[in-house]
Structures are given as C-alpha cells and as structure tokens.
Image (tube, rainbow, N blue to C red):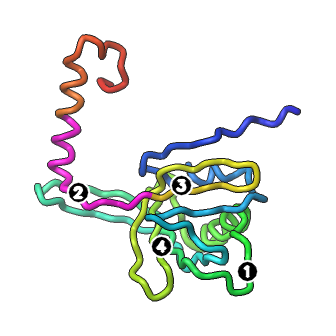
Amino acid sequence: MNAPASPLLIDFHGDASLGAVLSALGQHAGKALIIHYGDRTIRPGYHVTEVKAGSFVTLDCGGNPDAWQETILQIEDLGPEGERSFMPVGKFTGILNQVGQRVRLNPDARLTFEIGPPGAPMQVFDVDTLQVGADQIDLRLGARAAICKPRHRAEQQKETSQCCASPASKGSSCCT
C-alpha cells in the first residue's frame, strides 16, 4: 500500500490557521470529527451556526498597534435530537467550502472557535491539537486567555535572551 502515513498528533500550540487545520483534515473526510473544549467533549449532533471572517485593527495597553485576520467558527453543542453520530470531517469541511464560495476566507487567518451548549454563554477557544485515529479525528481546543501583549512580548524576549546566553544553545531554535 502506497498511501501516505498520517501523523498521529498535530500540535498547533493554540496558534492554528484555517488553512493548516483544513489541510490536516483533508484526507479524512469519512472520519467523525469530535471536538473537545474546556472539560467537555462535544455531543453528537453539534451544529456549526456561523462562520465569521474578521479583520482586526487594535491598539494594546502599551500603545502598540496590531492587525490580523481571523476566521471564527461558532458551534452550538446540541444534544442528539435525531442525529446520533458525530459530524463527519467531510461535512465539516464542506460547510467551510460552501461559506468560502460566498465569504472570502483567508487560509492564513487565525482560527478561533466560539462554542457552548444552548442557553449558556459562548466561550472562546484556540486549536491545540488534532489527533488522527482510525475512525475519528479528535480536535482539542484550549481556552484563550486574556493577555497583556506588551508584558507577554517582554517575557518572550527575556526567555529568548536567557536561552541564547547559554553555551548549549548554539544551533538551538530558541535563538532564531
């Protein structure tokens, strides 16, 4: 058999683009897509209620401007009324393809999920990991924390400086 081997786990570290996730799902149309968020596993019968393509221009608390594009998938965690199985990957990607015919979806845009059960406030999540199984894809979402961007950038620069100061870091990815 000459089929390409699928990676068992793709780690997006909470920073996935729409294109990267669609590419990872591409060869698995017949598998069930099971979404895990917070401390929950989505119920069979979940519903993609809206797909948003957003462009954001912001000013952070340090006076620094920023701009990015985001694709936001709003999903309602419905119980199994009639539909007793999880959505197939092909149906999920088909929904996004249909939306893409009417709304410009940038494949490089950050992918965000707004998700929650009926009657409860939505929560915002980023894609952490995608795990490929024999019959299903497990998409694990992580809660998006509020951050102070100037402090976050300063902490990242400090970590990089400390890493690069170490003699063992020559050739390390932390200094590039």
Quarter residue 30 falls in? bottom right
Identify whether 34 is placed above or below 156. below
Q: What's the distance in space between the residues labelled 2 and 3, CA to CA?
A: 25 Å
Identify whether 123 is placed above or below 33. below
Q: What's the distance in space between the residues labelled 1 and 4, CA to CA?
A: 19 Å
Kindly identify the amino acid type of the residue bearing the numbered disc 1: Glu
Q: Check the image and name the residue furthest to the front.
A: 39
User: In this view of the protein, which residue sits in the foreground, 120 or 18?
Assistant: 120
Circle 2 — which element?
A: loop
Identify whether 174 is placed above or below 98. above
Q: Badge 4: how crowded within 10 Å, few (<14), some, or many (20+)?
A: many
User: What residue lies at 18% left-to-right and 40% top-to-bottom?
Assistant: 155
Q: What's the distance in space between the residues labelled 3 and 4, CA to CA?
A: 21 Å
Kindly identify the amino acid type of the residue bearing the numbered disc 4: Ile
Quarter residue 4 falls in? top right
Q: Earlier in the sequence, mark 3 or mark 4?
A: 3
Mark closer to the observer (2, 1): 1
Q: Is residue 11 magenta?
A: no
Q: The magenta stretch spans which residues?
A: 142-157
Mark closer to the observer (3, 4): 4
User: What residue lies at 20% left-to-right and 52% top-to-bottom?
Assistant: 149
Q: Quadrant of the N terminus?
A: top right
Image coordinates for residue 161, horizontal then vertical, percent: 19, 26
User: What residue lies at 16% left-to-right and 54% top-to-bottom?
Assistant: 64
Image coordinates for residue 141, horizontal then vertical, percent: 48, 59
